[in-house]
Amino acid sequence: MTKKPKKAKNPIDYPILLTIIILVAFGTIMVFSASFYYAGMRWGDKYYFFKRQCLWAVVGFVAMAFTANLDYWKIRKFSKLLLLVSIALLVAVLVVGVERNNAKRWLNIGGLSVQPSEIAKFALVLFLADSMSQRKDKMKYFFKGVVPYLLVTGVLFGLIMLQPNMSTAGSLLLLVMLMLFVAGVRLWHLGLLVVGGAGAAVFLIKSAEYRMERWYAFWDPWKDPLETGYQIIQSLYSLGSGGLFGMGLGESRQKYLYIPYPETDFIFAIIGEELGFVGCALLIMLFVILIWRGLKIAITAPDLFSCLLASGIIGMIGIQAVINIAVVTASMPPTGLPLPFISFGGSSLAIFMASIGVLLNISKYSKIS
């Protein structure tokens, strides 16, 4: 096992901390702006989503502060346990989970709604970082170095697909491929995975009628504007209405029950409508800063475990942000992934912020400037 690095010599990465504070604060404001009408209609309380997002933001900041100050090497020994717990939770959600929109993705724990797939992402990142760093000499071999991790990932992938949740399962595969690349897997091995993954994606899309409908809607949403193409069309209406500077904060029209899920999957469209191209560009810039600093921490990490862990954390966030924005801008078929730190979603926000705490912890040991 890699030796633990010497005592931290650096302060935490303040650009990342400041970026996260801005993202969470901005996201909380936009959750209220995007949801107050629906919340009032559905729950009789226009602050329904806002209050819950504020609560989870507080939980997230506490979690981030804890993981930023807890020696990240201490959580390494729990990597296998956390992975097993996440598998158990994914099984539990299929048995006793809450069903919404014909999918079981949430567990009610103590009155709170938790999405186990979010926990599984971090658990997988931690497990892969620990295991790959210990087996670095075997990563050049396909059957000894790659296949074992494909089998582990396949278990999580299968359980998430049963919910069903192809978007999260797919992002999990992209995340694993990123970490395999960082671990030093041969490029032609990754090429095989890309070809195999593309073939599997085609098969899975064709195996479900609703996925095929989404695919057709992506190519021509106007063919069925009231059903399969509705989400894409309303999202583009929202973005187009914003123009350069937007209609003004709180002034969106699409959130009045026109665009589906304005506070979660399609919150970026509401941002575009209210704050325009400039607001969207500034938000994307914040994500670019976050990813850039995260990659610098990974590159300058003191050892392979730290490098893999930092890469996995920033990859987890970056992949999801890119997919969400691509969906909202009709750059890929519709799917259900929230925008990190911005969309409404308690377990997602808390896990992401706790993960950022680990990244900040690693930054104290990195040779970053």
Image (cartoon, rainbow, N blue to C red):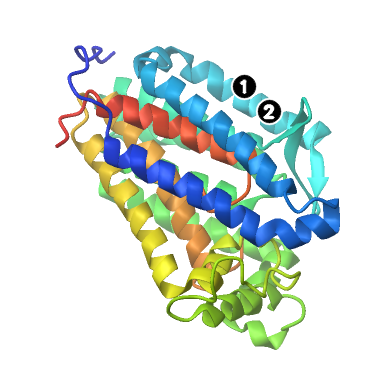
State the residue position of label 1.
85
224 on left or right of 53: right
Using the image, determine if residue 51 lies above or below residue 59.
Answer: below
| Secondary element type, mark 1 | helix
Q: Horizontal and vertical percent for residue 290? A: 33, 47
| Secondary element type, mark 2 | helix
Q: Nearer the viewer, residue 227 or 348?
A: 348
- Residue name at image x 49 percent, y 72 percent: 331
- Answer with the quarter of the image where residue 105 lies: top right
Residue 89's label in the rendered image is 2
Q: Is residue 233 visible?
A: yes
Q: Is residue 185 visible?
A: no
Q: Give the quarter of the figure containing the C terminus.
A: top left
Q: Horizontal and vertical percent for residue 262? A: 66, 62
- The amino acid at mark 2 is Leu
What distance separates the C-alpha of mark 1 from that of mark 2? 6 Å
- The amino acid at mark 1 is Val
- Are dots 1 and 2 in contact, CB under 8 Å? yes
